[in-house]
């Protein structure tokens, strides 16, 4: 066990990544709050205290990062057009030289293509500040790595679902969805497949950007309808796009107004990742089963 990994942002995806790595890696993770530190420690992960909304201690991060793989999964703040959390983290690394920096971005960096297909070589045309923050963070990570001769991998990730991450509450509340003719294609990835891609990106000698999706774009309406059918719930009522404001939240509408088909060929060929849950029904069923097991 001579490999070490520092996970920054050890939440829903990060904890699963840590568990996947633990048999073969020494794993550390940052924690800001006492509650997060306790959860991380209970999972057998070494805790590195760091508050990325302040100025983290450079000594602890520098020691944990030097020679290690870094999986940076923390989101940016919810305002502005850059990512000060990532910038503070990189500054706190001091003279550390990690073996690789994995930055988890989003497919939102491509903007709205009105259902057109995007690859990793497509232009980055973010249409809102949420995505502009991700483009700025990608650039900062890549520039920092280039200056130190560190391998950099950017994973562009769409909507993540899995156990505890299905829209069951929304369906039970009877919230509406867009009519199929008003709902453009979207992209998803089951959390287990995302973790597989993260491990491959850390272990394989690759660099650059990778789209991490299940390869089968589906509308949000279809996702909601299939979840309802498999979970035994009533399907969502449907509304036209013109009727959606006031009936669908502004945050959700901002996602729904963008549509694109994300190509995952590079992930499959260079990372060697074939999604286990390429079929939406399989991923939803596995998520429900995992959720039920966790509640027993």
Image (spheres, rainbow, N blue to C red):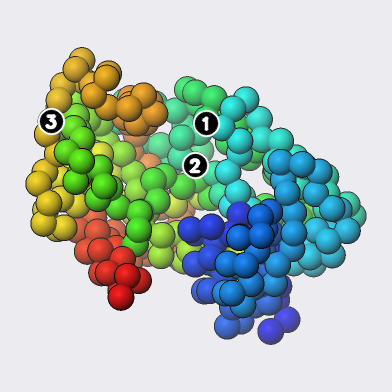
Q: Is residue 143 visible?
A: no
Picture residue at 11% right of the left edge, 56% below the top: 232
Q: Which residue is mark 2?
A: 106
Whether residue 6 is situated above or below residue 241 in the rendered picture: below
Q: Is residue 256 left or right of residue 270?
A: left
Picture residue at 66% right of the left edge, 30% below the top: 82
Q: Secondary structure at mark 3?
A: strand
Which label belongs to residue 131?
Answer: 1
Q: Secondary structure at mark 2?
A: strand
Q: Which residue is mark 3?
A: 238
Q: Earlier in the sequence, mark 3 or mark 1?
A: 1
Q: Is residue 117 left or right of residue 74?
A: left
**Labelled pair 3, 1 in contact (Cβ < 8 Å):** no
Q: CA distance from mark 3 to mark 1?
A: 28 Å
Mark 3, other Cα within 10 Å: few <14 / some 14–19 / many ≥20: some
Q: Is residue 163 visible?
A: yes
Whether residue 112 is situated above or below residue 30 in the rendered picture: above
Select label 3 or label 2 by which is in front. 3
Residue 172 position, x and y percent, is: 19, 46
**Labelled pair 3, 2 in contact (Cβ < 8 Å):** no
Q: Nearer the viewer, residue 275 or 177?
A: 177
Q: CA distance from mark 3 to mark 2?
A: 28 Å
Residue 208 position, x and y percent, is: 60, 49
Picture residue at 90% right of the left edge, 55% below the top: 95
Mark 1, other Cα within 10 Å: few <14 / some 14–19 / many ≥20: many
Q: Is residue 26 left or right of residue 175?
A: right
Which quadrant is the C terminus positioned in?
bottom left
Q: Secondary structure at mark 1?
A: helix
């Amino acid at each position: 066990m001579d490999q070490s990994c520092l996970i920054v942002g050890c939440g829903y995806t990060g904890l699963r990544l840590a568990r996947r790595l633990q048999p073969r890696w020494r794993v550390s993770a940052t924690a800001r709050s006492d509650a997060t530190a306790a959860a991380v420690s209970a999972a057998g992960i070494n805790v590195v205290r760091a508050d990325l909304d302040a100025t983290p201690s450079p000594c602890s991060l520098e020691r944990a990062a030097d020679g290690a793989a870094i999986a940076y999964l923390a989101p940016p703040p919810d305002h502005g057009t850059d990512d000060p959390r990532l910038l503070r983290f990189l500054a706190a690394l001091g003279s550390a030289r990690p073996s690789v920096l994995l930055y988890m971005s989003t497919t939102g960096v491509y903007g709205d293509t009105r259902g057109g297909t995007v690859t990793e070589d497509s232009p980055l045309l973010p249409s809102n500040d949420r995505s502009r923050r991700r483009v700025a963070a990608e650039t900062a990570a890549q520039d920092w790595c280039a200056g130190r001769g560190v391998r950099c991998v950017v994973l562009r990730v769409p909507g993540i679902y899995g156990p505890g991450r299905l829209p069951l509450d929304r369906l039970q509340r009877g919230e509406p969805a867009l009519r199929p003719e008003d709902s453009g294609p979207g992209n998803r990835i089951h959390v287990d497949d995302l973790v597989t891609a993260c491990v491959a990106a850390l272990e394989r000698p690759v660099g650059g950007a990778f789209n991490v999706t299940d390869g089968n774009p589906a509308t949000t309406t279809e996702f909601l309808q299939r979840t309802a059918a498999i979970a035994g719930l009533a399907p969502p009522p449907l509304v036209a796009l013109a009727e959606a404001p006031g009936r669908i939240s502004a945050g959700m509408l901002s996602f729904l107004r963008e549509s694109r088909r994300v190509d995952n060929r590079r992930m499959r060929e260079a990372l060697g990742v074939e999604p286990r849950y390429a079929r939406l029904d399989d991923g939803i069923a596995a998520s429900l089963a995992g959720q039920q097991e966790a509640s027993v």
